[in-house]
Structures are given as C-alpha cells and as structure tokens.
Amino acid sequence: MIQAVGLTSNPRKALPPAVDDVSFEARAGRVTVLLGASGAGKTTVLRLMLELQQGRGLTYFRGRPLHRIAHPSREVGVLLGDVPGHPSRTVRGHLRMLCAATGVPVRRADEVLEVVGLVSLRDERLGTLSRGMDRRLGLACALLADPHTLVLDAPADGLSSRENRWLHGMLRAHADQGGTVLTTTADPKEAARTADQVVTLKEGRLVADQDAADFARTRLRPRVAVRSPHAARLAALLTKEARTAHCSVEVVQEDGNRLSVYGSTCAHVGEAAFRHGILIHQLADETGDMGSSAVLAAAVGVVGAEAHVEASATADCTESDTDADTDDSFDNPAEAEAATEVDSEGEVEDADTTPPTPAPSPSLPSPRAADALSALPPPISVRSAPSPLRPLRYELRRAAGISTGFLTGAAVLVVSALTAVLLARVGHTPQARLLAAWPAQLPLPPAALGAGLLGALAFGDEFRHPALAADRGTVPRRLGMLTAKLVVAAFTALLLAFLAIGCNAEVLYLLYGREFAKVPGDWLALTASWFGLVVGCAWAGVLAAGVFRSTTAGLAAVLAVPVAVVPLVQAAAGNTSVRNAAGLSVRLREVLLVQWPFGGERYLSAAVRLVAQPVGWALALSLTTLLCAYLYTTLRSRVR
C-alpha cells in the first residue's frame, strides 16, 4: 500500500509549484492510475514519492518511507523515462549487471526477458532499441528484484494496442497477487478501462480520487462519432432538430469531415441523415474525453485522436465482419469491441478488406507471441544474504560488459610500444625509462595515463549512464561500491603495467636486440615503484571521478599530480625527505625494541624510500585529499 500525504514541490521562482498538496492512497491488490494532461504534475508526483526531487510531504510504502527501507529495489520497482544504461551494453548484460547489484540470481535476467518478450533481442545493444522495446526493458528492470510495488511512469508509451493489452494484463496479474501498482497516463479512456482507482490531477492539484466505475460515470462523456462529406450540413440539421425537440444535444465539428455528437444516439443521427439524403462514412458510439471535447482532447494530450479512435460499440451502427476475427484474439467481447480501430480516412477496418498481415521480423516478438507470454516471472523464493562480494560482482560485470576498457587498454599498449621505439631511436634514455616508455618531457607514461583513464571511467560512466540511479535519483555512494571499484581498478592497473613493460621489452628486442631489452640491476625497487605509480594513478582517477562526477575531472586530477602537486612538494620539502627516510627502519627498531622478522627491515626501507620520493609524496597526498573529499560528500548526501 502506498500512502502519499501533502506532496508539494518547491516553488519555481515566480511560478507556482508544479505539485501542490497532493494526497492519495494506492491500495494493495488494485491498479491505481494518475491521470492528467501533459504538465499536470504526474511525473513530479512520482519523483517526490521516490525522494528523487526535493519538496514537502511524506510517502509511505507499506508503512515505511523509502529511505528507511534496507533494500528499496526489493520493495519498489521503478520505471521513469528511458532505461539509463550504457548504449553499448547488451540487453542481457544490462540485466545481469543489475542482478549482481541487487543480489538476485543471474537466471532472473532470463526469466524477466521471457516475460517481457525480449528473448530474441537479448544480444542487442541498448542504443539500438526502439521506444517500445526500451519500455519493455524498463519494465523488466522494474520486475527484476520481484518487488511488491510497481511505480511506472507512462509504461504504455511507444507500445502498440496489442502490447498495451498485454501490459495491462501483466499489471493486473501483479495486483491480483497482492501487489500494488501505480501508473500514469494522459488518456482518460485508458484509465477507465484498465484501472481500479483513478487519481485525476490538473495543474499540479488533485481534482478527483475515484473508483474506475465512478470515474467513467462522472468524468467521461459518451458521444456519437460521425464522418460524412457533408459534415457541416449534417451538423446544422442536427442542431436545428435538437432545438425544435427541446433536446440537450451538442454537435462539435472536428477537423475535416468529422463530427462529435453529444447527447444523442447512433439511431437518431442515422435516421436524420437518411431522411435528408446525407451520405455517412462512419457512425459509431464512442466514449468521449472529459469536458468539452474540442478543448480537452488537446488538454489530455491524445496524439492523433482524429486519426485513430477506438470504437466501443460499433456493432449497432456499422455492418462488418470483424467479430469473427476479434473473438479469436481477445478473451471477452468488451475487449474485442474496444479494439476496433478507425483508419485515418474515418472508415471502419473490415476483415474482408484488411490486407494480409506481413510475417513478423525474426528479431522482434510476433503479436500473438506477445499475447502468449506468461503473466509474471516466478517469484524469488530464497534471497541471498548481503555479501561484501556483491559490489565486486557488479563492478566486474560493469567493466567487462562493454568494450571501452579493452579498447583503451589496447590503445595504451600500442602507444607505449611506439613511444619506447622512438626513445630507443633517439638514444640517451635511461633503461628504466625506456622500458616504461616514459620520456622526460611527458608528466606520466602512457600506461599510467591509461590506468588513470580507466579508473576515471569506473565512476564517470556511473554518472553518465546511471543504471543504479533509476530508483534513487543519484549514483549510490556506498563504501562497498568504492572498495569494489578500487580493487578492480588496481587489478586492471597492475595488468596494464605488466603488459606494457612486457610489450615494450619484446618490441625493443625484436627491433634493436638484447641490449635495449635488458633488465636493470635494481629491478625489484623499480618494479615496486612502477606498480605503485600506475595503481596510484588509477585510484586517483576513481576518487576524482567519484567526487566531481565526471570522467574528464578524474583524468584531470591524474594529470594534476605530476604537473601541479609534485612541484609543490619539491618546493616545500626539497630533498630532505629521502635523506631522513634512509634510517627510518633502524630508528623504529630502536624505539620499539622489536626485531623485524624475515628481513622486514629491507622491505620497510624500500617502501619508505618509494613513498618518500616527490612523486610518491604527491600521489599519496592527492589520494588522501580525494578520499577525504569522497567521504565528506558521502556523509553530506546521507544527511540530506
């Protein structure tokens, strides 16, 4: 059950708030629809309920606000706008990544894909999906964690009429199992046909909160739709007869040759046209829009209402053979009548004149296959306990699900090898710098820059394509996620550093012989320094991108360490740090009166000398500052 009390958005300068004091309840086991025109505040209400937008008011999901729920995705399934995923990620890979984040089994991704009819598109990229397929994927993401409540913003947008019936059938099945469903729409006829409760909004205020039957009786107007080449003459005739008979009949002439007659019947309009010899192309009972049809048809935002109208009772006014076909496609006659469509010329589509339906594309689900889909995915009977490996699994799937990291690594290796060849050709380069492909004119070697870029992408892609922010509004800043990103970034940096040295040595050996590829004598200290530099750059990119929410800012922070921080450290400390660190291990042993086991003095001295270098000091200082800034922003967001 959802209880929304006093939802009010913050005022917008001189304009009134988009939502003002909206309160309603969406009970379990029922489908509740927020109805309103474009700009009525439907999406703003949902964002206020989900705490994605600042404002006033309270919303309780089964008695608890969303920020008090330990696992929000297991309580509320959300669909707001397009699916926020990387366009290069596959449909199946995106769902499996979310499975790792929410802690549900990986097979759940295949189950929801089968329910929403995207099994044949599981290997398609997100950037290639149509609007309707994107809505299906968003629905799959909402159902992934088997939530009790579904909050969907215009879920039928981009779907065909048959897909709409499938969607509403699935939402009905979820409600029949005891779940709560809250959706939005701008079509009053759709709300009356699919909802148990209709909450009407207008200009950010609550207009009505009614059952579907009361809404259909009080807010919708029946009308007779007429198409005739002599529409103006027929309108004048009907108006004249209504005045003579003192009947309350309203005739509204729509665009072209279409009339909407309120307060009359098909029989009366047809008889009047027959008596005066007026040709009729269409005559059908319809369920009209709220209020005056000419004004409110545009207000509710029904796109192409004049070109595509759903007839509700055409059997009494038109003679066609569509009944035989509709009986096979729908479960009850009411749906068959509601599905009869009128083409752009106003003529009812007849089964005898309808062209044969082309065979469906093999990459898309056929219409009848969509109707045959199972109503809901099977429930999750056993949920895994919270595990510290869950963020790590998510990060691994996120990094390996797209080709950006692999392409970046390949480009870094190629640039590093070319740089090493150029340095060997020029000559006068120390062997350590030659193997690392680090010219003295560059602030960092290509491998360190590549590691920093990959680290910055770890958080930069989260903010650019916020797959985890669909129901939170922002990328979560949990320490578990930060730890997972740091671990994966360190592993990637170590692998990149090792491959760069190996590729450089092999290329130098092939082109110039063994002399240019020999290993320096102090290789152990140099290797530690090399790995420390590359991992430090990767961590700096991760932390800076997490603080500044941008990949560019993360890479800029990596470049700022040798360009700006190292000169400051050199100017402040000079070369005294290296001399003071020379006997640190001996002095620690004299103070602590403890003998270092297994030759620990040597390793401690090497680590101290490594950190005591200007680049080491600068990198350590930068990482400490970025980590403190990240923790500060995390605590500030939690307080808010």
Image (tube, rainbow, N blue to C red):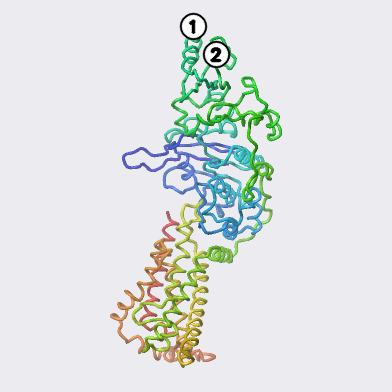
Q: Distance between the residues labelled 2 and 1?
A: 16 Å
Residue at the spot x=42%, y=54% of the render? 640
Label 1 sits on a secondary structure element that is: helix
Q: Which residue is drawn at 59% across and 39% down?
A: 164
Q: Quadrant of the N terminus?
A: top right
Disc on res. 244 = 1
- Amino acid carrying label 2: it is Ala
Q: Indicate which label's residue lies in the foreground, 2 or 1.
A: 2
Residue 169 against residue 241 in the figure, above or below: below
Could you tell me which secondary element the residue under label 2 belongs to? helix
Q: Provide residue 267's location: percent of width, then percent of height.
A: 60, 14
The numbered mark, 2 or 1, whose residue comes first in the sequence reads 1
In the depicted view, which residue is nearer to us: 232 or 574? 232
Identify whether 465 is placed above or below 406: above
| Image x and y of residue 25, in percent | 54, 37
Q: Residue at x 54, y 26 (%)?
A: 346
Q: Can you see residue 2?
A: yes
The one nearer the camera, 393 or 88, is: 88
Mark count: 2
Q: Is 409 placed left or right of 361 in the picture? A: left
Q: Name the residue under label 2.
A: 273
